[in-house]
Amino acid sequence: MAIDVKAIEEHIKGILIALGDDPDREGLRETPERVAKMYEEVFEGMNYTNAEIAQMFEKTFSEDIRSGCGDMVLVKDIEVYSYCEHHMALMYDMHVSVAYIPRGKVIGLSKIARICDMAAKRLQLQERLGNDIAEIISMATGSEDVAVMIEGCHSCMTARGIKKNASKTYTETLRGKFETDTALQMRIRGYHI
């Protein structure tokens, strides 16, 4: 599915009119085009399924890693932003931590950050974002043992509605051994804090 930039431009022009402004005035004349280009960039992940994102970043390195020995890869504090699907409001100051137990191969560390970025570039819920990242990491690495922890601020909570600007949302997605092994859970939570 490709993002329809021209349709976005027309709809933004309609929104400006609905807000009581003149889209042809100097300050707004190019706003529909700018917003459409911004949406094309910030919603790029909507063009791809989780499987397609995993294929984009599936290059792994075979390593001499003993499967099942408890070795773990953890990348923490990956900064992303996304947009809440309920209000199309910005989810910001988001920090993602991703852990997995390798199964004889490892993925490049920058690929983990790229997967987080691409999954976030969709209309999202923070809970679904954790699930999407876990699913993509699992597909790309071949490991079922994946954990994703996310801390973020939601402008639908901080800038509108209840306006609680200090509020943060924490989510945790656990798969495989991370779901059942309490010692492993304590390890990742200790690193995450």
Image: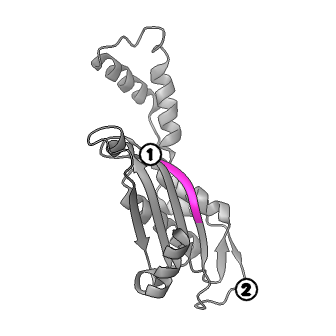
Please, which colouring scheme is shown? one colour
Residue 73 drawn at (x, y percent): 61, 75
Q: Which residue is mark 2?
A: 64
Q: Residue at x 54, y 78 (%)?
A: 143
Q: Is residue 189 magenta?
A: no
Q: Earlier in the sequence, mark 2 or mark 1?
A: 1
Q: Which residue is mark 1?
A: 1
User: Which part of the image, by quadrant, shows the N terminus?
Assistant: top left
Few, some or many residues within 10 Å of mark 1 (<14, 14–19, 20+): few
Q: Is residue 84 visible?
A: yes
Residue 141 drawn at (x, y percent): 58, 73
Q: Splitting the image into 4 quarters, where does residue 58 fall?
A: bottom right
Q: Residue at x 40, y 28 (%)?
A: 7
- State the residue in front, 145 or 62: 145
How many tags in the picture?
2
Q: Amino acid at mark 1?
A: Met
Few, some or many residues within 10 Å of mark 2 (<14, 14–19, 20+): few
Query: Marks 2/1: CA distance?
Result: 40 Å
Q: Magenta region: which residues?
A: 76-81
Residue 28 drawn at (x, y percent): 45, 15
Residue 140, numbered label: none
Instruction: Examine the rendered structure and indicate whether residue 138 appears above or below residue 162.
Output: below
